[in-house]
Image (cartoon, rainbow, N blue to C red):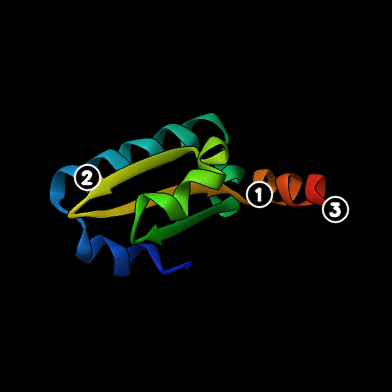
Amino acid sequence: MPKDIFYIAKEMCSECWNQLSKTIERIENNNIDNIKDLLFYQYDNKNQIKPIAKKAISIIKCNNKFYALFSKQDLVKQKQTFF
């Protein structure tokens, strides 16, 4: 389920939020246009994230929830390969 990244930030501990911030910063430094292409999802259990984990830029486990950062382009490409 997609959620606003700042809403999720309230649920994450500071260590995990820092990890996410560093990942986003690295993406921004490589190509600032890629920031607009990011999706951030929250998953409640490991089984939900397994099928798409290979496409995730970053997966963070925090407080028994999983958070995944994806590129929209990667998810679109993956969806097209299934059809």
Regarding mark 2 in the picture, which secondary structure is present there? Answer: helix
Going from N to C along the chain, the mark reached first, 3 or 1, is 1
Q: Position of residue 33 (x, y in %)?
A: 61, 45
Q: Is residue 39 left or right of residue 64?
A: right
Q: Going 33% across and 61% down the picture, which residue do you hit?
A: 44
Going from N to C along the chain, the mark reached first, 3 or 2, is 2
Residue at label 3? 83
Q: Residues within 10 Å of mark 2 (few under 14, many from 20)?
A: some
Q: Which mark is residue 75?
A: 1
- Residue 78 placement: quadrant: top right
Q: Going 48% across and 44% down the picture, which residue do you hit?
A: 50
Q: Nearer the viewer, mark 3 or mark 1?
A: 3
Measured Cα–Cα span from mark 1 to mark 2: 23 Å
Q: Is residue 38 left or right of residue 19?
A: right
Regarding mark 1 in the picture, which secondary structure is present there? Answer: helix
Residue at label 2? 16
Q: Residues within 10 Å of mark 1 (few under 14, many from 20)?
A: some
